[in-house]
Amino acid sequence: MLEALKAVQSQLVTLWTVIQHTFSRADTVEYPEQKPYTPPRYRARIVLTRDPDGEERCVACNLCAAACPVDCIALQKAEDDDGRWYAEWFRINFSRCIVCGLCEEACPTYAIQLTPDFEYCEYNRQNMVYEKEDLLISGPGKYHDYNFYRLAGKSVHGKDKGEAYREERPIDVKSLMP
Amino acid sequence: MNDTWLDILIGNGLVIAILLVVLLSLAAVLIWLERRLLGIWQDRLGPNRVGPLGIGQVLADMIKIFTKEDWIPPFADRAVFILAPTIVVITMLLAFAVVPFAPGIGISDLNIGLLFFLAMSSLAAYSVMLAGYSSNNKYALIGGLRAAAQTVSYEVFMGLALMGVVILAGSFNMREIVQAQAANGWYIVPQFFGFVVFLIAGIAESHRLPFDLPEAEHEIVAGFHTEYSGMKFGLFFIGEYLGVILISAIITTLFFGGWLGPWLPPLVWFCLKTLVFICFFVLLRAAIPRPRYDQLMSFGWKVMLPLALVNLMVTGAVVLVQEG
Amino acid sequence: MTKIIVDDKAYEVPAGNNLLHACLSLGLDLPYFCWHPCLGSVGACRQCAVKQYQDENDSRGRIVMACMTPASEGARISVADPQARDFRAGIIELLMTNHPHDCPVCEEGGECHLQDMTEMSGHTFRRYEQTKRTHRNQYLGPFINHEMNRCIACYRCVRYYQDYAGGSDLQMLGAHHHVYFGRHCDGTLENPFSGNLVEVCPTGVFTDKTFSQDYTRKWDLQCAPSICQHCAVGCNTSPGERYGRLKRIVNRYHNDVNGYFLCDRGRFGYGFVNGDQRLHQVMRRQGGSEETTGQAAQVATAAAGHRALAELLARSDSAVIGSPRTSLENNFALLTAARQHFCGGFSAAEQQIMQTAVTNYRQPDIGIPSPADIETADAILILGEDILNTAPVLALRVRQAVRNRARDLAAAAGIPAWQDAAVQELAQQSRNPLIQLTVDNTDLDAIAAINRQLAPADIARLGFAIAHGINSEAPAPNDLTAAETELADRVCALLNHANRPLVITGTALLSTAVLEAAANIAKSLSRKLDAPCPLHQCLAECNSLGAAMLAADSATLEQTLEGVEDGAIKRLLVLENDLYRRCDSRRLDAALDRLDELIVIDHQWTATAAKADWVLPAATFAESEGTLVNSEARAQRFFAVFPGVADVRAGWQWLTAANPGAWAAIDAVTADRASAETVAVEQVATEKATVGKVAVGKVAVGKVAAGNVTIDAVTKACAASQPLLAQIVAAAPPAEARSQGRQVPRMPHRYSGRTAIRAHINVSEPKQTPDPMSALGFTMEGDPTHLPPALRPSTWAPGWNSNQSIHKFQQEVNGELAGGPSGVRLLDEPAAAAAATWFTEIPPAFRAAGDKLQPVPLYHIFGSEELSQRAEPIQARRPRDYIALHPDDAARLQVCSSDGISFSAAGLEFCLGVRITAALPAGVIGLPMGIGGLTPAALATPLTVTKAFDWQPPPSPGDRAVIASDLAANGGAAP
């Protein structure tokens, strides 16, 4: 009996608590009149960044495309004369993008990054298809120092074999020295 | 009392017309009201963009719902699928025929008005059941089955709860019940437990939260109306709000003295009291979580039914004793 | 069978193998590097460590290398043992210490055995913080990229390249952790099977250069089961497509045909599908212009093309010409369109030799060895065919047959065959005898017991002599020279000594006598063996045998041209056949000019297409489905990899749409005659269902428009029309076959970018192209693993992203694929009426005809074949234009190797450089097919040759300048 009364009381207290909220302020932020604060690591519009030397970071490895749950990234690899890989074209269909950030997590070169700019709606969906020239920015984004080719074993212009991070000079096979 | 239904229809033509317009638009406005109230109680704003205070949202929603694609799934039972949503609206509207809004305002002064209300509200269960069955969708079917079981269970003591009022008033006629309250005081006092049982049963009958298990979206998508869209979905929607208004109006009539009250005109009193209960329904939705289905059923049969029976017996005993 | 216990669970495995072989055959995951199913075990990488226990009471056990431990009766091992697991994790961590941070820019990424094994061993974090050793790369030619930093020194590349493929220019250089796998200096890898390094290398040291230039990850490639189009062996391939371009071809394991390996022509010769000679639109010749070229042709609509085709087919003065390089279905559709004036596309010489080949295969005392059977022979006689250049994968098989002497020796010495190092050590240079009688040197000379270069007629005579030597009932050629008799005796001795002799010959020399001689040898051997003797006949094109079986009684090209010349034929339809390769140009020019109309259906711009009034674009193998019959008479089906664009339609689609009336009738006929076969098809499919889980359902996925003929209907009608072809319907499951209720997905389940690929054209992506005529769909939804071999688009299994995953699809490692062999052998039943008779027409000995030189064809793996010669990387490897002369003839003509000679052949004037070779018999002139514009048509008559004084040597394709630019791209100079 006591339990039943307690149960009834609990329900009534609930109702009373909710009624009290009649007099509390709404937490709603009245966007767009009132702009919300977006932290620097907020996940929205995707960009392609450049490394500290000003070269494109994207090496067209296709991992972002593979990670994308809505399959909205497509690209084609191309290669410079010096062996540097880059994207011949790079397309993101933002009308499909769910800004989940998996592409950024998958990217081994910090090339693809999500930015706080979330206001990229369009009346015409076709305008939400971004090509490489729309995506590529001139800065390094959130990671200022990272340069993938300084760590990779492949030689590119300006970084010969053995010049990458923690690499020995190339081996002379014809030498018998240990 | 010898009027045929045709006489009633012709005699009350104007009232019926006004009532239809008012009820249907009220049901639409309720959508806005509910969203605003929920907003207030959940510390947010609710619809506030269309028109002053967002009242234009009603119109926008209507435009939306009327212009949506009216899709009938190819796997559904077509005839029943179309029929189902109309039943709920028709039965709910018919039930309003016996509601005494104010002296002289009302459609039918039926001597078995209360029974008519009970009958109509039970018929509404067919709507949900048929919708669930005809959708040919597992979620819809589960929703329909839940609705059937829930309605049948709560129907029992919903009627029993009202019998106390009937014993006190000595009549099934709604108008006479109100008049009896004018003489004896509002029945909320002698019939408090009857009121509680009826209120809870009423919530279950109209499938409102916390008893909206037939459409529990966390478990079964949208229950019986999973496959519905466009205006057919709109009919279910309006039916639900008509149910809310109806139950509120009936509570007002049976337990809170209907149109009775000082200073203000009777109709205003009636409307005010009804509005309070409508808001109470919204408050319940804002505050109380949905129980499990087995909890709902055991609550109905193990708590509400005994309570209703005890209430009935005590009332009957008291009346017998008083009458000597 | 042997019982072994793995992790306390008992298994039955075939006896005589090692534990790694056994574990992989059982479907257990055990990482490995240095082991390869075809190369045996050397125990170098230590990656496949497991723990072995003496008995059930032994709780300590000891770590052994699974690949070096025999799966002996009752062997008790643990793969999951923590100590073994730690050991494997440690090994991979050590192997990875020098591996560069390269995966994003590595072509192997996503199908890398090293990645898979690293994942499998659980090495996820790099603890080694010291420096990595680095290497300079080498330029290895147009096929292969080299990135030596990635090497983990498993030695598989050199073991494959030197031991298996017989190459000598890829070596292990240097010592200890400085070992280097490369050439002694920059330069092209010469072995024609170098492309397999891409699949043999467990990491990204050797990658496909042609693929890298238009790169796509494996998970993004839309694949379909396909058959190589570049010779008659019929290797199973898995081509991959993305963005409407064929990107690469990899091997698709078929136990009986190609095993694990392809030749470089098959792997890198796909460029013609994307090439600039490719036809995509209907074109009609501009009115009035005499000389038509690509520019003078005008683009027309497909509907107009259909009308023109229908008009041509409706007339009685039209003739049609089929092709041995297109599918049976296309040829049959053509045959149905104009039964009266059908020509199979063979010249008279080809027709004669092909019919001889078919007759030979139907002899009761001649067996047809599959390429895999060749490996089991212990003596091989190759008569007249340069198989490395005409049927390359057979040469690889022959090489193994010769090496397999070592296995016999090892078996006698009690050494298991998989103990690779021990077996090689034991065998030293012991080989099974290989006897080659050819017109010129071949690449197999080095391993052959007897080589002799002779003129075709002499090869045939010697063949007859050998047949007579083995069985004296066989007719003998008269007046053989003493040297020839002695040679014949030596060959007879070797063949008589063998338990499993095998004869290989071919049509490349266009000499029927050679084929007949080979048949006689096989017949006489079969008398000795008392069993049919295997005889493999190499054929010219991918469907030579199919076309020959279909066109057994039809006209030859010469007969058709006669019809044109005498005015009986006024219109001509040519299907995927360049007549200028087979006929005298001058005669053909005149004949084609006489025509009222010439329609060509082809996917390439050819000399014939240039003469056409209408050119209708055909689908290549990559865009259509069809059946090919290979040189062992195995009918195999290839499937479209991607839908054709623009007006591209398969030949049979053009033809069936042009005369639907004929097809309505055929359909009715077929329904009656093929009803029995329908049952057969369903039975086949049901049988597969038990293994491959494919069931024939009545599910109609897409709609085949009413009245449209399906490919399956054409196949069925084709099968019903020819008793020899009756089995072709069973080459692959029919279009209704479903796996788990769905079509087989051509795309991997990881296929990316579906909502972005076409977004620049229209943001609303279209639905996937339906493919109602096939058991495969252009989709990523469905079951990619449990499939009958004929339908498996690519090789992938969970955790095994590289082609190494093939063991998940084999019944046993190196064994047959689960679901049984794909394709059906058509000629295993000998002809009922065939009597075991001898061929008796022995040609006279070859005599140089005065001043004239007898042309003989020389073949080059890169450049001789019609389609692959259009691919850029193949062109880079084709030899410089030349003709070959014997020194005596050169002396008579007063030319030396830096001179040119001119001659006229097949109506064309040639002026080519001279290569002088003593190997070539005197009195013949070696014409390299496909090089310098030389075609089989030039072989018809003896040639009058004169010295060309104004000849200048053309620049060589392998110029230093080219190498230098490639070098720059590969990061530096040679070590």
Image (cartoon, coloured by chain):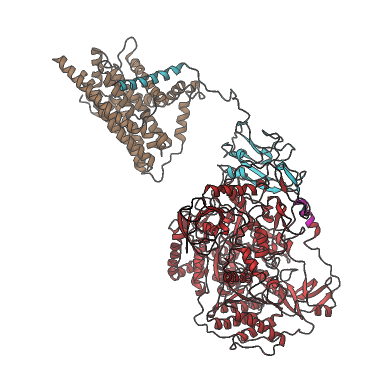
Report the label total: 0
Front residue (pair B123, B63): B123
- Asked if residue C968 lies in the magenta stretch, the reply is yes
Q: Is residue A159 left or right of residue C315?
A: right
Residue C574 appears anywhere in the view: no
- What x and y, as percent, mark residue A34? 58, 22
Q: What is the magenta segment's predominant secondary structure?
A: helix
The extreme right residue here reads: C949
The part of the image, by quadrant, that contains residue B235 is top left
Q: Which chain gets the cyan colouring?
A: A
- What x and y, as percent, mark residue B67? 46, 35
- What x and y, as percent, mark residue C750? 56, 48
- What x and y, as percent, mark residue C399? 64, 69
Q: Which chain gets the red colouring?
A: C
Q: Quadrant of the C terminus of chain C?
A: bottom right
Q: Is residue B210 left or right of residue C482?
A: left
Chain B: colour as depicted: brown
Question: Residues in magenta?
Answer: C963-972
Q: Is residue C888 left or right of residue C798?
A: right
The extreme top residue here reads: B263
Q: Is residue B118 left or right of residue A136?
A: left
Front residue (pair C459, C588): C459
Front residue (pair C260, C601): C260
- Asked if residue B9 lies in the magenta stretch, the reply is no
The part of the image, by quadrant, that contains residue A121 is top right
Residue at horizontal 38 percent and vertical 36 percent from the top? B223
Residue A109 appears anywhere in the view: yes
Front residue (pair C8, C893): C8
The extreme bottom residue here reads: C479
Residue at horizontal 54 percent and vertical 53 percent from the top? C62
Above/below status of C427 relative to C562: above
